[in-house]
């Protein structure tokens, strides 16, 4: 679905086990013991699809398609990229999950990409 990015929060970083991709704490995986963890990122944002706003989370692999790790880790670069993305219309796909802590719905983004105007025009002309 098409949606505008209306807010972007600061990125969060965490470590995962390279074997099972589960969260690792202090280089330790519950299943694989002491490991060399991989650094991962996530970003919370708010999108508006024209009917309402919803808080979203986009995880590392998909996130790196729109913001590089270098931009996420460097606050000055992140601020520039954030300004570039705010107000931008994107195509987003994912699923809604109930956030028990805040009693609200969160949208977990599985895919996020720029709108390809030529394809959109062709689709609308059908």
Image (spheres, grey):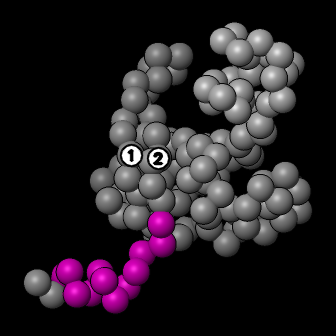
Q: Nearer the viewer, residue 38 or 110?
A: 38
Quick check: 118 left or right of 24? Answer: left
Q: Earlier in the sequence, mark 2 or mark 1?
A: 1
Please identify the quarter of the rendering in which residue 30 is found: top right
Residue 49 placed where, x, y %?
Answer: 36, 57
Q: Which residue matches tag 2?
A: 109
Q: Secondary structure at mark 1?
A: strand
Q: Nearer the viewer, residue 49 or 33?
A: 33
- Residue 90 drawn above or below residue 24: below
Q: Position of residue 68 (x, y in %)?
A: 73, 61
Residue 12, x across and y down, in percent:
74, 38
Image quarter where the C terminus lies is bottom left
**Residue identifier under label 1:** 94
Whether residue 82 appears in magenta in the rendering, the answer is: no
| Prevailing SS of the magenta stretch | helix
Range of residues picked out in magenta: 113-124
Q: Is residue 119 magenta?
A: yes
């Amino acid at each position: 679905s098409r949606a505008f990015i209306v807010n972007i929060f600061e990125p969060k970083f965490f470590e995962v086990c390279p074997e099972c991709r589960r969260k690792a704490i202090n280089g330790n995986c519950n299943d694989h013991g002491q490991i060399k963890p991989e650094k991962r990122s996530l970003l919370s944002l708010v999108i508006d699809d024209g009917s309402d706003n919803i808080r979203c989370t986009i995880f590392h692999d998909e996130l790196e398609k729109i913001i590089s790790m270098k931009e996420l880790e460097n606050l000055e670069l992140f601020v520039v990229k954030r300004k570039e993305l705010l107000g931008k219309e994107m195509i987003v796909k994912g699923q809604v999950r109930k956030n028990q802590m805040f009693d609200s719905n969160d949208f977990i983004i599985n895919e996020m990409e720029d709108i390809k105007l030529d394809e959109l025009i062709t689709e609308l002309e059908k």
